Image: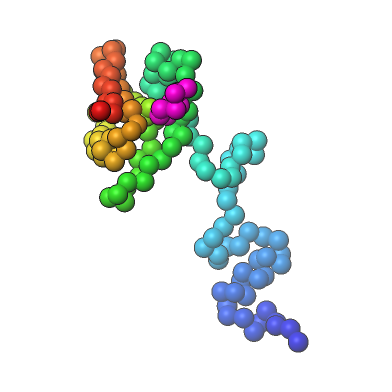
Amino acid sequence: MGIKIEDLPLRLQAQARAQLAGQQNPVSRIQEPEIKNPKKETFGARHRVPNKTELEYQRFYLRGKDARYEALTFRMANGHRYTPDWVVFNDAGKIECHEVKGGYALGSEQRARLAFDQAKVEFPWIVWVWAKKSAGSWHIAVCREEK
């Protein structure tokens, strides 16, 4: 006792015929993911890379430290998430989170600053660093745990 393709609704008939013919399903809402670079691994979490400003900051200010790009994401009480640009793990067991901004004042900078300030309040045992490059120079503000 089997099911005939003709017994299925028209939409499912088209899907079944397309799969039997070895074609990509033209009716399905979920299609196979497009692999742009077969050499690059595309599974799991997204792999982001630092921009030029973040790389420059790493070269000059984080040299020789165990600095990892977007290594932690903080889930805050207000339901928002915040991922700092650089997370530094030092030998003493302290964690430093560095947020790096360039000279262009984008709309995302205000949102990042709000999230940064909220994370500072909720995770006071972490050293928080806000670094902004403008007019070719760096302005760095370090917020440490108060004793």
The residue closer to the viewer here, 146 or 139, is 146
Quadrant containing the C terminus is: top left
Q: Residue shown at 56%/57% (left/top)? A: 31
Quadrant containing the N terminus is: bottom right
Most extreme residue toward the right is: 1
Residue 4: where, in percent of width, then height?
70, 82
Occupied quadrant, residue 14: bottom right
Residue 116: where, in percent of width, then height?
29, 35
Q: How is the image coloured?
A: rainbow
Instruction: Look at the picture and state if 136 lies above or below 114.
Output: above
Magenta residues (range): 87-95
Q: Residue shown at 28%/22% (left/top)? A: 142
Left or right relative to 28: residue 117: left
Left or right relative to 24: residue 62: left
The residue closer to the viewer here, 71 or 26, is 71
Occupied quadrant, residue 18: bottom right
Instruction: Look at the picture and state if 110 lies above or below 32.
Output: above
Instruction: Look at the picture and state if 34 lies above or below 96.
Output: below
Residue 89 visible, this angle: yes
Report the number of discs: 0
Occupied quadrant, residue 95: top left
Residue 128: where, in percent of width, then height?
31, 28
The residue closer to the viewer here, 23 or 97, is 97
Residue 53 within the segment the image draws in magenta? no
Residue 88 within the segment the image draws in magenta? yes
Q: Residue shown at 52%/43% (left/top)? A: 45
Q: Residue shown at 56%/45% (left/top)? A: 44
Most extreme residue toward the bottom is: 1
Residue 56 visible, this angle: no
